[in-house]
Image: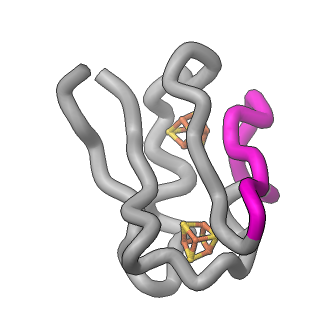
Amino acid sequence: MSYEINKDICVGCGACAGNCPVSAIEQMDDKYEIDSKACVDCGACESTCPVSAISKVNS
Ligand code: SF4
Ligand code: SF4
């Protein structure tokens, strides 16, 4: 399990990256991406995103 950012919805605000306790979210061009190997599934980013671009995925 991990969390994933939907790039079609993400507006690149960076709020999620600033709230990730393990720095698993990196900027990729004008969007952000979650490193599924580093993510510890805390869910902090999901509740931070103003446009609900982050959701839990099975992987
Ligand atoms: S779920 Fe937690 S650990 Fe995973 S990317 Fe989001 S804030 Fe970081
Ligand atoms: S908080 Fe949401 S809109 Fe902002 S960079 Fe993260 S995923 Fe994109």
* Residue shown at 45% from the left, 44% from the top: 43
Q: Residue 41: x percent and y percent?
A: 45, 29
* Residue shown at 37% from the left, 29% from the top: 2
Q: For the view shown, which residue lies furthest in the front direction?
A: 29
- The C terminus sits in image quarter: top left
* Residue shown at 80% from the left, 58% from the top: 18
* Residue shown at 73% from the left, 73% from the top: 30
Colour scheme: one colour
Q: For the view shown, which residue lies furthest in the top direction?
A: 37
| 53 drawn magenta | no
Q: Is residue 12 above or below residue 19?
A: below
Q: Residue 47: x percent and y percent?
A: 45, 65
Q: Residue 9: x percent and y percent?
A: 40, 79
- The N terminus sits in image quarter: top left
Q: Nearer the viewer, residue 58 or 48?
A: 58
Q: For the view shown, which residue lies furthest in the left direction?
A: 58
Q: Nearer the viewer, residue 54 or 31?
A: 31
Q: Is residue 29 above or below residue 8?
A: above
Q: Residue 37: x percent and y percent?
A: 55, 14
Q: Quadrant of ligand 1?
A: top right
Q: Is residue 17 above or below residue 20?
A: below
Residue 31 located left or right of residue 41:
right
Q: Where does the magenta region start and end?
A: 18-29
**Number of marks present in the image shown:** 0
